[in-house]
Amino acid sequence: MRRCLVDTAVFIYADGRSHPYRKPCQELVRRVAERVLEIEASVDLVHEYVSVQLRSGRDRGEVVERARQIGALCRLHDVERRDIARMLDLLGRPTRLDPRDAVFAATALNRGIDAIVACDRAFDAVPGLERIDPADSVRIDELS
C-alpha cells in the first residue's frame, strides 16, 4: 500500500454542501473508514478542520465529535522543528502554497511520503510530492 498524506479539504468537502468534490471525497473517506485505504496527516489537519467548520457556523459539539473521528481515521504526525524549517524553505520558493499547506507538504516529505491526496493544485509545484486528486478514482485505486 502506497503511503499518502491527506489534505484537510478532503474532509471539508466530504462533510460539506453540494460541490463537485463532495462525492469523490465522501467515497475516499468511506474507503478509509472501511480500512480499504490508509491515510496519514499532519496533526494540523484536525485543527484546520475544526477551525473551518466552526467559522462556517456548524454546531461545536458535532464538529468536535467529527474531528475526533477524523483523527482516528488517520495516522497523525506531530509537527516538528524540521517540518517548520522545510515549510519555510517551501514558502521561500515561488509557489501558491499557503503556510498550512506548506506544513502538510513538509510533513509528508520529511517522512518519506511522496503523495498527497488534495484538491488544491498548489501542491503540484512541490518537488518530490505527487498530488493525487480525490476525483481521480484510478489514481486513488492505486493507493490501496
Image: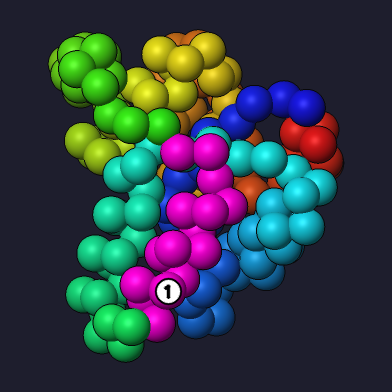
Kindly identify the amino acid type of the residue bearing the numbered disc 1: Glu
Q: How many marks?
A: 1
- Residue 95, magenta (yes or no): no
Could you tell me which quadrant the C terminus lies in?
Answer: top right
Q: Is residue 69 left or right of residue 85?
A: right
User: Residue, x 19% and y 17% (percent of image)?
Assistant: 81
Quadrant hosting residue 60:
bottom left
Could you tell me which quadrant the N terminus lies in?
Answer: top right
Which residue is labeled 1 in the image?
Answer: 65
Depth order, front residue of 10/76: 76
Magenta stretch, residue numbers: 62-76
**Whole-percent x and y of residue 105?**
39, 26
**Whole-percent x and y of residue 50?**
30, 65
User: Residue, x 60% and y 31% (percent of image)?
Assistant: 4
Please identify the dominant SS of the magenta region: helix
**Whole-percent x and y of residue 5?**
53, 34
Quadrant hosting residue 2:
top right
Quadrant hosting residue 37:
top right
User: Residue, x 41% and y 64% (percent of image)?
Assistant: 67
Q: Secondary structure at mark 1?
A: helix
Q: Is residue 43 visible?
A: yes
User: Residue, x 30% and y 44% (percent of image)?
Assistant: 44
Depth order, front residue of 131/12: 12
Q: Is residue 122 visible?
A: no
Q: Is residue 23 left or right of residue 109?
A: right
Depth order, front residue of 105/126: 105
